[in-house]
């Protein structure tokens, strides 16, 4: 895993800003892992993908994740701060280790991937989405299975236990009304928002310094962040 330079972040943003969030996450990872084809990244279990995104986030923006959520009870705005390294350590096993199939009622399943989520993206309701993913993850499926609610719940629970980083859930407590609830953190979308914000700041910096000094975009992006900030201060004074 390598940290992305400003030039890399610029290119990632330009490549991904029109894509679906699932594809943006893969494009971002692909830039940090150029030796791994994006098609192979799409077949990683979601926990492995999220762990890699957390590690990339630490490398590019530091480990502290600052965010906010609205309390579903009273709409109070809550700020939170978490450590991406702590979240990354939530995996129960090494991401590179082979995962044993999940077996429920003699049916074997692999863990869901980004490709599975993409395939279910157009499904309208939560139950149909779950069935679509379960069907796609079944190993050696040979018939159209009918899934009971109990089976769906057990498969989902077993998958979540086997891949705890597949869905990152934050436990929050509202100081205003006392409500406790869980909020989902989509690390791919969160990281993308930071990349987009960084790219927009870089566009402004390039415009300002190119106008002031006649430098090219490549020359401006090659500057260290501290030197670029000093030149921006001079150009804007």
Image (cartoon, rainbow, N blue to C red):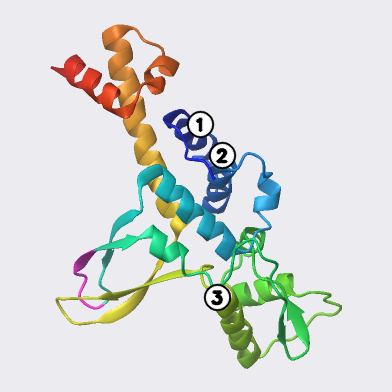
Q: Residue 70 placed where, x, y %?
A: 26, 67
Would residue 108 be found to the left or right of residue 14 on screen?
right
* Pointer 2 with pointer 1, Cβ within 8 A: yes
Mark found first going from the N terminus, 3 or 1: 1
- Looking at this view, name the residue that lies furthest to the top: 214
Q: How many C-alpha atoms fall within 10 Å of the one at disc 2: few (<14), some, or many (≥20)?
A: many
Q: Is mark 2 on a helix, strand or loop?
A: helix
Q: What element carries label 1?
A: helix
Q: Which quadrant, please, contains the C terminus?
A: top left
Task: Give the label on residue 126, or none.
Answer: 3
Residue holding disc 2: 31
99 or 189: which is nearer to us?
A: 99
Q: Is-magenta flag for residue 75?
A: yes
Does 156 appear above or below 78? below
Kindly report which numbered mark, 2 or 1, lies closer to the viewer in this rendering.
Answer: 2
Magenta span of residues: 73-79
124 or 31: which is nearer to us?
A: 31
Q: Residue 124 placed where, x, y %?
A: 57, 69
Q: Is residue 185 visible?
A: no
Q: What element carries label 3?
A: helix
Q: Residue 226 placed where, x, y %?
A: 27, 27
């Amino acid at each position: 895993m390598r940290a992305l330079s400003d030039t890399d972040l610029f290119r990632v943003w330009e490549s991904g800003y029109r894509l679906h969030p699932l594809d943006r996450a893969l494009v971002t990872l692909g830039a940090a892992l150029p030796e791994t084809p994006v098609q192979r990244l799409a077949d990683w279990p979601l926990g492995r993908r999220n762990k890699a995104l957390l590690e990339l986030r630490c490398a590019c923006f530091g480990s502290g994740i600052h965010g906010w959520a609205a309390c579903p009870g009273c709409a109070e705005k809550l700020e939170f701060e978490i450590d991406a390294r702590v979240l990354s350590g939530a995996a129960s096993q090494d991401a590179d280790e082979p995962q044993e199939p999940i077996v429920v009622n003699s049916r074997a399943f692999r863990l869901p991937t980004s490709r599975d989520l993409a395939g279910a993206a157009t499904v309208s309701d939560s139950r149909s989405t779950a069935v679509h993913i379960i069907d796609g993850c079944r190993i050696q499926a040979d018939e159209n299975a009918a899934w009971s609610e109990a089976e769906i719940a057990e498969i989902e629970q077993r998958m979540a236990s086997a891949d705890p980083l597949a869905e990152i859930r934050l436990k929050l407590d509202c100081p205003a009304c006392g409500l406790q609830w869980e909020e989902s953190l989509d690390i791919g979308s969160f990281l993308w928002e930071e990349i987009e914000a960084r790219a927009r700041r870089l566009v402004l910096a390039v415009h300002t310094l190119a106008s002031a000094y006649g430098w090219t975009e490549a020359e401006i992006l090659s500057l260290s962040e501290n030197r670029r900030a000093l030149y921006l201060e001079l150009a804007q004074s």
